[in-house]
């Protein structure tokens, strides 16, 4: 018996990385999945984003667990597309209990040199996109007698400042405000709303040349081996990054009955970065 | 990746283990395979208006852990008394092996009494000594054995919503001391998280709202709340529940001390029905 038998979860950014991990973890506990991912590039993002094949792989992994999954290529910046994806998913799977608003992008620049486009892409995806994914889910969660649970992915940069990430830091801080207001507004309907705050996670978002170069500006084309110590120096625990599964376990605690009275909180999974 | 919450072969030190949250944590970790060193004062403290735990309560915790086929060493000891606490912990280690998990849970609540003229200074001293100094003693009594063992570990300090807010403050010595001590516990957690990270020992706090235990479910508290409707209203939760159950705190702790949270350290985790976000 799983912790989420009979439940349905909506996961954004589900094609790979943390989103795929969340979909698979929730499915392993019995949930059916509504999965969206844009599966296309964003102008100012300097690394390859997910592909339709990645989203198909998520579907394969969820189906291997004998759970149902509805996948849609949709952009979190498009509120109408989010509503369509959620409503279609609920029509096919029957209900909605859990939202994991996870889709996000990363790029680097000092604030002084940041283009309007880079700022706008970031805010549109990592802040407005979280809102546009959650909003159409709310009526479905309210339809349940036992409410539901929403987790929005923030970051350690949602609780502390990070240089070269003014846009990302602003968006991830903004998410915390969104979570707190949603927690207030939705508590009467037994809908809990929390955020998770990962340190660096071992996914394609950080394992790329652009990120490596940001962490080691002193080197031309630094590799993974050359950035590990720099990553580790940010954390209190002696590790460079956590795995997607570690964030999924936090999400699972928050959305399952174990966290039935947990709402409005910011939960770091950060190897002690914020305490260091 | 297989991350487990199996504590087979692990030893957990739990203070305040005779009843309430402490007993719930002992049973929960025993269910997941841990052996338990259970410490409780099992006696009254003068400024505390409600009846504290008894030796019979501690014996009941032992019975419930043993019913799960786990070993338990119980000791009556005062967390304020480092020598007594160290002796209790050492005896537990001698019998069960080095400590892997520490739950510094023992606490008192001398505030919210119906006494119209309490000894404020004594209440302040008592609650800071038990709820803050006692937490320090507990960690220091166990950590050397954890470092020697070299297998990492997890420590959870029980703070409170009163460790994150001062809502409901009434100027009494008990309330002042409770909020100060529970805020102080966060400071201890943060410095310990830094101290112990290199040993892969993780340190976090939990922050419960009111929990259904004898600490809040007693005649004194009921009388105080009826006489002080303003404070009673200030202490209401955001979610439509009056209080949470001990098992809800145990669930948070079970997650924090398991491999599922293997990279979670330095975190203040509310289990508060939205009290702090309200």
Image (tube, rainbow, N blue to C red):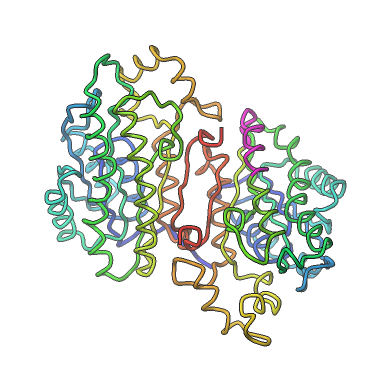
Residue found at the very far front of the displayed protein: A112
Foreground of the two, B57 or B190: B190
Foreground of the two, B24 or A93: B24
Among the 4 quarters of the image, the one containing residue A203: bottom right
Foreground of the two, A195 or A213: A213
**Range drawn in magenta:** A177-191
Residue A251 screen position, x and y as percent: 58, 52
Residue located at (65% from left, 71% from top): A206
Residue located at (35% from left, 58% from top): B192
Among the 4 quarters of the image, the one containing residue A124: bottom right
Among the 4 quarters of the image, the one containing residue A47: bottom right
Task: Check if residue A182 falls in the magenta segment.
Answer: yes
Residue B32 screen position, x and y as percent: 37, 53
Residue located at (42% from left, 34% from top): B245
Residue found at the very far top of the displayed protein: B227
Task: Check if residue A178 falls in the magenta segment.
Answer: yes
Tell me: A258 left or right of A116: left
Tell me: A31 left or right of A72: left
Q: Main secondary structure of the magenta part?
A: helix
Residue A211 screen position, x and y as percent: 67, 74
| Number of marks | 0
In which quadrant will I find the C terminus of chain A?
Answer: bottom left
Position of B51 relative to B249 (above/below): above
Position of A197 relative to B81 (above/below): below
């Amino acid at each position: 018996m799983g912790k989420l038998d009979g439940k349905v979860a909506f996961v954004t950014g589900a094609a790979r990385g943390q989103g795929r991990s969340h979909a698979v973890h929730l499915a392993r506990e019995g949930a059916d999945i509504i999965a969206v991912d844009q599966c296309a590039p964003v102008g100012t993002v300097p690394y390859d984003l997910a592909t339709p094949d990645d989203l198909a792989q998520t579907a394969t992994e969820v189906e291997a667990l004998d759970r149902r999954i509805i996948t849609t290529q949709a952009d979190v910046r498009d509120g109408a597309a989010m509503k369509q994806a959620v409503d279609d998913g609920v029509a096919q799977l029957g209900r909605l209990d859990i939202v994991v608003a996870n889709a996000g992008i990363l790029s680097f620049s000092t604030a002084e040199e940041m283009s309007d486009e880079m700022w706008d892409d970031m805010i549109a995806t990592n802040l407005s996109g979280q809102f546009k994914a959650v909003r159409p889910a709310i009526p479905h969660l309210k339809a349940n007698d036992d409410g539901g649970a929403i987790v929005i992915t923030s970051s350690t940069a949602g609780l502390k400042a990070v240089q070269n990430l003014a846009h990302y830091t602003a968006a991830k801080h903004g998410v915390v405000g969104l979570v707190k207001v949603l927690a207030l507004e939705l508590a009467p309907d037994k809908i809990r709303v929390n955020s998770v705050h990962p340190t660096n996670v071992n996914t394609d978002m950080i394992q790329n040349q652009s990120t490596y170069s940001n962490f080691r500006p002193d080197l031309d084309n630094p590799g993974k081996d050359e950035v590990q110590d720099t990553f580790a120096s940010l954390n209190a625990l002696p590790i460079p990054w956590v795995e997607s599964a570690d964030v999924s376990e936090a999400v699972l605690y928050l959305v399952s009955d174990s966290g039935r009275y947990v709402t409005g909180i910011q939960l770091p999974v950060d190897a002690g970065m914020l305490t260091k | 990746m297989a991350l487990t919450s199996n504590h087979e072969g692990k030893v957990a030190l739990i203070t305040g283990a005779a009843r309430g949250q402490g007993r719930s944590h002992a049973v929960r970790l025993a269910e997941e395979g841990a052996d338990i060193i259970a410490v409780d004062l099992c006696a009254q403290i003068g400024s505390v208006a409600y009846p504290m735990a008894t030796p019979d309560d501690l014996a009941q915790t032992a019975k419930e852990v043993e019913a799960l086929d786990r070993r338990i060493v119980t000791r009556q000891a005062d967390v304020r008394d480092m020598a007594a606490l160290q002796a209790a912990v050492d005896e537990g280690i001698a019998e069960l092996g080095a400590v892997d998990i520490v739950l510094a849970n023992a606490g008192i609540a001398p505030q919210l009494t119906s006494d119209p003229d309490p000894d404020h200074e004594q209440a302040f001293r008592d609650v800071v000594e038990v709820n803050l100094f006692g937490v320090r003693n507990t960690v220091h009594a166990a950590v050397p054995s954890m470092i020697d063992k070299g297998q990492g570990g997890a420590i959870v300090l029980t703070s409170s919503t009163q460790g994150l807010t001062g809502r409901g403050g009434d100027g009494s010595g008990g309330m002042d001391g409770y909020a100060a001590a529970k805020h102080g516990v966060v400071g201890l957690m943060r410095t310990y998280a830094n101290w112990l990270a290199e040993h892969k020992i993780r340190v976090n706090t939990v922050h419960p709202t009111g929990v259904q235990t004898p600490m809040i479910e007693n005649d004194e508290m009921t009388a105080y709340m009826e006489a002080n409707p303003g404070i009673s209203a200030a202490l209401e939760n955001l979610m439509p529940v009056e209080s949470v159950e001990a098992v809800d705190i145990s669930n948070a702790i079970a997650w924090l001390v398991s491999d599922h949270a293997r990279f979670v350290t330095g975190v203040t985790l509310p289990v508060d029905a939205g009290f702090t976000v309200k």
